Amino acid sequence: MTHIGIVGAGAGAAAAAFTVDGAVPDADVTVFEKSGGLCGRAATRRHGDLTYDYGANYLKSDDERVVDLITETVDDEGLVDISQPIHVFDADGAVSPGRDSDEHKWSYRQGLTQIAKRLFGETDATVHRRTRIETLRRVDDRWEVDDADGATYGPFDALLLNPPAPQTADLLRSAEWESPVREALVDAVGDVPYRTIWTAVLHYPFALDVPYYGLVNTDKAHPVGWLSREECKSGHVPDGESLLVVQANHEWSVDRYDADPAENVAALAGHAADIVGDERLADPAWTDHQGWRYAQPEGGVDRGPIDSARREGLYLLGDWVAGEARLHAALANGLDVGERVAYGI
């Protein structure tokens, strides 16, 4: 039996587990996730009749393998396509139409976290939630991991690491692993820059009369980087209501990350009112918020050390390895890593 350990239960990890499980019938896959949820920043919450994706906003149809995976391979019940376009706004908050695009913008009626739930659900993988891995250990030619409570798991023939690059670098830096590739790997992973995003979720008991699903700030000079309407996703918001997801830009998010959440939410609601041109948006009926310290990679990683680490049964995966801060990129990278693990390439 082939024993596979995966740290992190993001979209890439789910795609890798799905691929390994399908290609290696006797594979024993164990996943460790520090939080209580699945799919990493492709995260979904519910509040009463509201369902909302408060991290990644949607899945693009930019990779044929991912399109086949989502629409043909796994259950596509409840898959929804956002038909409204994405417009742009500038530093002054002036909105204008964006470029037309034929790309799909997918979520599910139950939210984006369904991607990982469905992929893991197709496997026999054991998923340990609320289990923070703190130590990696190379023992002979296999791997062991220790969690925060001191429990040891393994040994594993291959170990896959799916956390954001800064957290992966921390694990590698403290790993009990003597290897000529280790120092270069830690340096490469630690050099990946990340964007911080502080997000406000704003609910209103009225519908907005605007022609767009989302607004993106193209000149990177406004405190808000992104604003979108969850009511454009079927099943997320009751008719006659609105739910906005407002993401601050990196600089604003870093400056205000530890500020009073109520003040942050109020500030972003005020910005939303100015951008959309509706003063009612400054006074939401209900709110939620989330800070994402490591939201999106802003650059790629030197693949040389990552490729070398595979020879010792260590695989790194995620959107930061793919070099593109997109959900489809994380899934595509997970499929690729899963194939490498399964076929030893």
Image (tube, rainbow, N blue to C red):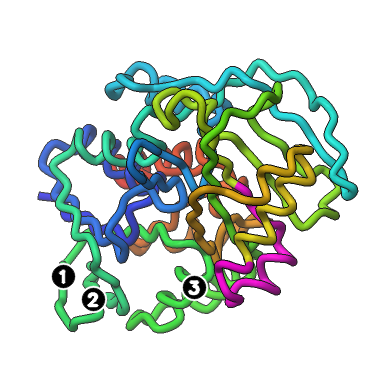
Nearest to the observer: residue 223 or residue 99: 223
Say which element carries label 3. helix
In the image, is 267 to the left or to the right of 39? right
Label 1 residue SS: strand
Viewer-nearest of labels 3 and 2? Answer: 2
Q: Which amino acid does label 2 sit on?
A: Asp
Q: Where is residue 328 in the image (x, y as percent from the top left)?
A: 51, 36
Give the total number of marks visible in the rendering: 3
What residue is shown at x 23% (from left), y 34% (from top)?
A: 23
On the question of residue 110 being in view, the answer is yes
Which contiguous range is marked in magenta?
246-263
The correct choice, above or below, for 65 with respect to 123 in the image is: above
Residue at (74, 38) in percent of width and height: 278
Viewer-proximal residue, 258 or 322? 258
Separation of marks 3 and 2 at Cα, in angstroms:
17 Å
Residue 122 vertical position relative to residue 272 in the rendered view, above or below: above
| Residue linked to disc 1 | 153
Q: Where is residue 108 in the image (x, y as percent from the top left)?
A: 39, 28
Q: Which residue does the numbered mark 2 point to in the structure image? A: 147
Which of disc 1 and disc 3 is earlier in sequence? Answer: 1
Q: Distance between the residues labelled 3 and 1?
A: 20 Å
Determine whether, in the image, residue 18 is placed left or right of residue 337. left
Residue type at mark 3 is Ala
The residue mark sitting in front, 1 or 2, is 2
